[in-house]
Structure formats: structure tokens, C-alpha cells
Image (tube, rainbow, N blue to C red):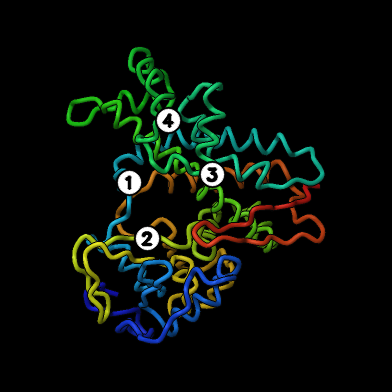
Amino acid sequence: MSAATGMSVAGAPVMGAPTPTPAPSLLAPGVARDPYPLYRILREDFPLVRDEPLGAWLVSRYADVRAVLGDARLVPGEPGPGPAHRALVEPSLRAAAERTAYVLARRIAGRHEVDLVAEFSGWLPAAAAVAALGLPFDDAARVQEWCRTGRTRLGGSHPELAGVLRPLIGRRRAHPGTDLLSVLCGTRVHGRPLSDEAVTGLVGTLLGGGGEATAHALAAFLANLLDHPAQLDLLRTRPGLIPAAWAESLRRDPPTPIVLRRATAPVTLGAATLPVGAVVACLIGSAGRDPYRFADPDRYDIFRADPAHLAFGAGGHFRLGAALAGLAAELGLRALLDAMPGLRWAPGFRPAPRGLIARAPRVLRVRLR
């Protein structure tokens, strides 16, 4: 779809003028427990509609959501770092994520039954980020709590984070090591080192990537595989399929089902022109289950030819959180499969995802042997 023309995916209805019929709201009772019936109604009958209680325009079809995410006039609340940072941080992240995943997995491997959220997926992304940065143990617990609660979404403007990093940055500049914080302190752009503020901002973004959304994505990934034991068993013998399995989980169960964009200029969506400042809610959770884009969209299938998820946006913008999430998923699953050959749901347990803005199972009770 083009956000300017209102064209939509082939065979799908075209996004038209906002309907005058009152539409159901995302804030209606019960939607946070199970939003998918409402998503179907919105895709079919209200592809572009103003949700007055939410204070935003809702876009729910895959082609339309993708177009909004790629429209330069519709911007997120906070810009992220550019693609060049991936090569800078990924080697350190990979090594730290692998070490952390195996430590966490081995710590629980001898147990009979555990909650994987409390013991593994809720800690892996944050702990890996802390380890990659080489933060000291005394500060790691505080930083890890910021990660888990999402408090680092403010990045380098977070006063507690800046206070923790300031003396560490000074020491790394004077005596660099091999950790990621040393790498960032030694990075030069146009011949000049990154400022302390720039280093702190990148660290804040990385730690934000270790926060709630990444932990939720990992929990949903594990839940999808445990719900499909044949596919989980296949990944034991064919670990090269893990990235496809991860992408399919992000399509079916994105950790952040709603992403907001704000108009910096008048934007025409279908037959409506939104003014400067208008807020558009991109329903990622609805787009990933759009039957005009995906066959049998509610089914989890690691062999789906083109999952084309929108969980980390569309276009060329790279998010440090996306790199950390992918590494946590791949290396975390490998560690679990190596340490726990009998991994399966605990008898009688079924996951219960909940949440509207951030959605995932809060408990994953499994039997390890």
C-alpha cells in the first residue's frame, strides 16, 4: 500500500474513508485479554478509524500498517541508532548472550519443573546486555532491574543510568578493555571519539533492548515451540531453522502489538487526511494475522515461506534491541535444547498471554525431565 494513494495488498479491500459508524475501542473491556476478535472486526469493517478513547487513528491491515511504518512523515517518539551500529555491537552481544544463556540454562537443568519466564527468558536479554558491556557486579543488579521494567526506554537521559556510567566511561577511555563499553568509548566518527553523552545514549538504547519487549518476545517464542513439540524437536536436529522459527513467532505473537507514530506533516491515508500531530496506532498484532497477507494466519509454522513480520518496524531503520532479541532467541533456545533434552509443558499447564501494549505469557511452567 502507498500511504498517499490508499492502495492495499492485491486482493484485499482498499483502505477507504473513515466510517461514521462507531467503532469498538482498543480500550474496551476484555480486549487486553484477547484482542484478536477485535482485530478481525477492525480489518474487515474499520480499516482506518479514529479510536476516541485511545486518542489515535487505528490501522489494522498488513499492507496499510507496513506503509505507515515506512512513511517518513510518521515518526516514532524516539529515534533509534542507525544501521552502522550493528557491526559495532553484534560481536560483543553474541559472545555475551551465548555465555549468559548457557549459565542460566545449566543453573536450572537439574530441576524437575520450572517457570521459564522467572528463571530464564525474563533475565536473559538484560543479563546478556549487562555482560556485554562489562558492567560491574555491584551495578548490574540495578541496571538489570531497569532493563526488566523498561525504565531505560529514555536511554541516555535516564539520570541513574548516566550516574552509573559516567565514572565507568572515564576509566574505559583511560584503560580500555575488550568489553562493549570499551569498544564504544574507542569508536571514532569523522575522526573524533563519541562523546560521553553519545556513549551513554547507545548504552541506554542497548539496555532498553534488554527490557520488557525482548523478554516478552522470547517468552512467546518458547511458548509457540512448546505448543508444537514436533517443530521443537526438529530444531534440535536442524538448528539452522531457528531464525525462521523466531521470525514466525514475531509474526504471530509480536511482543509489542501496538506501535505509535506521530504525523510531522499532513498525511493522506486512504480518503482521510490526518493533520500534523495526529497519532496513528499501527496494530502490528493485527497485521501479522491478516488473511489477505498470510494463509492460515493463526497457525504457527516454522516452514512458512515468508513470515515478513513487522515486529521491529519496516524499512531500513536498525534497532539495537532487534539485534539483541534475535541473539537471545537463537542462543537461548540452543542452550535450553542442549541442557534439557526432555523440555516440555508441565502436566496440565497452558500459557495464557495477556496485555495490549506489551503482550506475552507471564508464566511458562515446564517439565525438564
- What residue did someone put label 1 on? 80
Query: Badge 3: few (under 14), some or many (20 or more) residues near its Cα, within 10 Å?
Result: many
The mark found on residue 161 in the picture is 4
User: In the image, residue 22 lies at what x, y percent?
Assistant: 42, 83
For the residue labelled by badge 4, is the local secondary structure a helix, a strand or a loop?
Answer: helix
Residue 74 located left or right of residue 43: left
Residue nearer the viewer, 161 or 27: 27
Q: Residues within 10 Å of mark 4 (few under 14, many from 20)?
A: many
Distance, label 2 to label 3, CA atoms, is: 25 Å
- Nearest to viewer (mark 4 / mark 3): 4
Instruction: Judge the density around disc 2: few (<14), some (14-19), many (≥20) Cα neighbours within 10 Å.
Output: some
Task: Point out the image quarter for the N terminus.
Answer: bottom left
Vertical comparison of 278 with 173: above or below: below
Callout 1–callout 2 Cβ contact below 8 Å: no
Can residue 62 be spotted in the picture? no
| Amino acid type, residue under disc 4 in the picture | Leu
Which label's residue is closer to the chain start, 1 or 2? Answer: 1
The residue that label 3 is drawn on is 328
Q: Residue at x 31, y 59 (%)?
A: 315
Seen from this angle, which residue lies furthest front?
53
| Mark 3 element type | helix
The residue identified by callout 2 is: 260
Is 94 positioned to the left or the right of 103 in the image? Answer: left
